[in-house]
Amino acid sequence: MQLDWLFFAMTIPAVLFAGVSKGGFGAGAGFAATPFLALILPPHVAVGLMLPLLMVMDVTSVRLYWRKWDWRNACAIMAASVPGVLLGMLLFNWADPDVIRLVIGLTAVGFVAFRLARARGWISSEPRPFSLLSAGFWGMASGFTSFVSHAGGPPAAIHLLGQQLDKRTYQATTVIIFWWINLIKLPPFLALDIITARSLLADLILAPVAIIATLIGAWAHTHIPEKPYFAAVYVCLIITGGKLIFDGLT
């Protein structure tokens, strides 16, 4: 991993996307960072680079949304995420880089398809009551996809958005959920050498960008409509996800 101008030209926008999303938009755009970086870095390097930065964003976000979350949903998803993280660790042990690229790409495109289906009314947007079964399934999926590509947001969103939580509660709930998931990912990331001394050096340089982006996201949470912001994010996801699927299959 060369820390040159091209590296920072790619990583700074990715970190900005992730931080703004974590700070104000329910972690949706944060998902775009890993597919974007995986275009220029091996998948495991991209994932390892992002985790410490995501943890910096988590600490900043938790302070901003302290105790505004829905405890029932948060606790259920956090508990279910543990076996999902373990499954993700197994995939990193046994799968080759093309398989991981394929998983990241399919998750990216699948999430955009899900959001489009909801917008078109193909998937019901009626509020659903809390379901422990739903929280368990999507929580496990969230832990798995978060470990593989920091893409735990889409599964968690599928469960949470169906309950029509208010904007602030939804945001705060995603904040505490991914603070926990990223925390429990750290030991296996270190054990598998996904995080390296070189990536930590890059993280140290990029940490101020992560903090500033998270604070911008918190400001944007109350000042900028979500629709135009996420429209741009979804375009990025389709492009990067499609490229990764192509690379994984060829």
Image: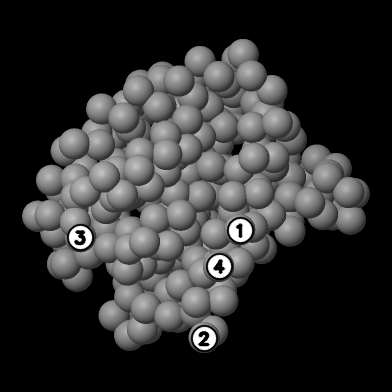
Contact (Cβ within 8 Å) of mark 3 with mark 4? no
The Cα–Cα distance between marks 1 and 2, rounded to whole angstroms, is 17 Å
Residue position for label 1: 239
Front-lying residue, 140 or 107: 107
Q: What is the number of the mark on residue 27?
A: none
The disc labelled 4 sits on which kind of residue?
Lys
> Pointer 2: residues within 10 angstroms few (<14), some, or many (20+)?
few
The Cα–Cα distance between marks 3 and 4, rounded to whole angstroms, is 21 Å
Contact (Cβ within 8 Å) of mark 1 with mark 3? no
Quadrant for residue 117, please give it: bottom right
Specify which label sits upstream in the sequence, 1 or 3: 3
The disc labelled 3 sits on which kind of residue?
Met
Q: Secondary structure at mark 2?
A: loop
Residue at (15% x, 48% y) in the render:
200
Contact (Cβ within 8 Å) of mark 3 with mark 2? no
Contact (Cβ within 8 Å) of mark 1 with mark 4? yes
Residue 14 in percent (x, y) is at 42, 43
Residue at (29% x, 80% y) in the render:
93
The Cα–Cα distance between marks 1 and 4, rounded to whole angstroms, is 6 Å
Specify which label sits upstream in the sequence, 1 or 2: 1
Residue 71 in percent (x, y) is at 51, 35
Residue at (64% x, 19% y) in the render:
224
Q: What is the number of the mark on residue 243?
A: 4
The Cα–Cα distance between marks 3 and 2, rounded to whole angstroms, is 23 Å
Q: Secondary structure at mark 1?
A: helix
Residue position for label 3: 1
The disc labelled 1 sits on which kind of residue?
Ile
Residue position for label 2: 250
The Cα–Cα distance between marks 2 and 4, rounded to whole angstroms, is 11 Å
Specify which label sits upstream in the sequence, 3 or 2: 3
Q: Is residue 143 visible?
A: no
Q: Is residue 63 visible?
A: yes
